[in-house]
Amino acid sequence: MKTDVAIIGSGPSGLMLGHLLRQAGVEAVIVERQSKEHVLSRIRAGVLETVTTDILEDLDIADRMRAEGLPHDGFNLADGERLIRIDIKALTGKQVMVYGQTEVTKDLIDAAPARGLEIIWEAEETALHDIESDAPYVAFTKDGAQHRIEARFIAGCDGFHGPSRKAVPEASGRGFEKVYPFGWLGVLCDAPPCDHELIYANHENGFALASMRSMTRSRYYIQVPLTEQVEDWPDDKFWEELCRRLPPAAAANVTRAPALEKSIAPLRSYVFEPMRHGSLFLAGDAAHIVPPTGAKGLNLAASDVRYLSRALIAWFKKNDAEGLAGYSQTALARVWKAERFSWQLTMLMHRFPEDGPFDRRIQLAELDYIATSETARRAIAENYVGLPL
Ligand code: APR
Ligand code: PHB
């Protein structure tokens, strides 16, 4: 099989990139390791910046998001007792859209066949070849048979564990990493959210987040040590601890419903530089990971593919190589700022095992500063809604 751009991975990065290329008449094929059902069942975050909603709008795949998504004008930080509202609408003129990544993925997958975007599911042993040449190819097996997709470029959209980043020779790239000594235990349930906006809470016992997918589906998280397992957290124990950490008014409003999904995700900051090697371009989690505290993962994937699709379209349609030459540097400038914000919010809102009373007082002082300074709130709001492309 031959195409213009072979895309590895059918997460948000690969799907948005594939659609943007197809819309401009560039050929693209996606190779995905998992089944379609598996990809559609993954529960991920759910706050979209305009960089992401704009892509769905431009692709004309935004009807369901517009109908079912919840535009939010603000969110809250809590310091144990007090709620500090970050009025993002008043401070930035923008909103964020609460609409699950699972739904974004579904909308993009459903629209693929009609747009001529082929997705090959359940591909095994995916491998990248000749990425330093002008004729790279992706090899894989499916149903026991060997296949290859020859392309002009390969887009590595295969997440943190995929083969694309690993295909870059060790001497040609560098990873920057920070691992946090805790994870987030998440619960999804069919119950109205405890507040109409998100609440990020910093409690003596650790972080908690009250989020939502809709007015009838809630998503909650609590910080837990990495040594703990999901089995250590029966529903009752989860609800007790969540309500202890949320501010009293929100806690009193939590509707306890059976968990539809419960999982623990470790927190990590990671950036790989550069995001290009020869004919291979990395995008999304393949190149960088943020802790979920700022809800930046999906939105960074969106900005990467916005830059990358523009550059690839200019190359194929106008013979203009400038965008591709600058892709890594342009994308990384935005990535590092989102890394900074996610790291800062993580440090501010979590309990670290090594923290003593001094560190706690510093966190409380910073939260008090945010509560009393519009300048501080504006800086947070500007980063939360997403820095300009
Ligand atoms: N071959 C083919 N596909 C692969 C392979 C492989 N060897 N390895 C991984 N993949 C697929 C995964 O199954 C997944 O569907 O690549 C896809 C990567 O998707 P994501 O991990 O969702 O990454 P990305 O599309 O960059 O999205 C970034 O979405 O998933 C969240 O936390 C992530 O919020 C972040 C954002
Ligand atoms: C979520 O709803 O899953 C969610 C929301 C905001 C975050 C992280 C996760 O910062």
Image (tube, grey):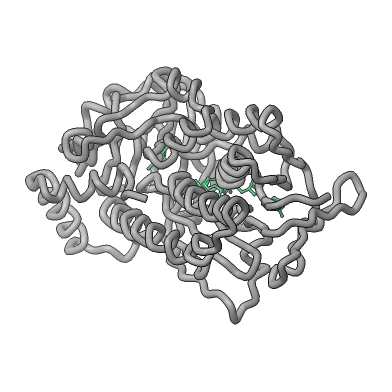
**Residue at 78% from the left image edge and 43% from the top image edge:** 122
Horizontal arrangement in the rendering, residue 124 relative to residue 39 (left or right): right
Please say whether residue 285 is visible from this viewpoint.
Answer: no
Q: Residue furthest right?
A: 145
Q: Could you tell me residue 240's position as x and y percent? A: 36, 33
Q: Is residue 269 above or below residue 85?
A: below
**Residue at 52% from the left image edge and 67% from the top image edge:** 325
Is residue 111 or residue 151 the one in the foreground? 151
Q: Is residue 319 above or below residue 101?
A: below
Is residue 328 or residue 178 the one in the foreground? 328
Q: Is residue 143 above or below residue 125?
A: above
Please say whether residue 130 is visible from this viewpoint.
Answer: yes
Q: Is residue 2 above or below residue 235?
A: below
Q: Residue furthest left?
A: 372
**Residue at 72% from the left image edge and 45% from the top image edge:** 29
Q: Could you tell me residue 24's position as x and y percent? A: 59, 41
Horizontal arrangement in the rendering, residue 21 relative to residue 252 (left or right): right
Quarter of the figure with residue 51: top left
Quarter of the figure with residue 215: top left
**Residue at 51% from the left image edge and 36% from the top image edge:** 101
Q: Could you tell me residue 83's position as x and y percent? A: 18, 36
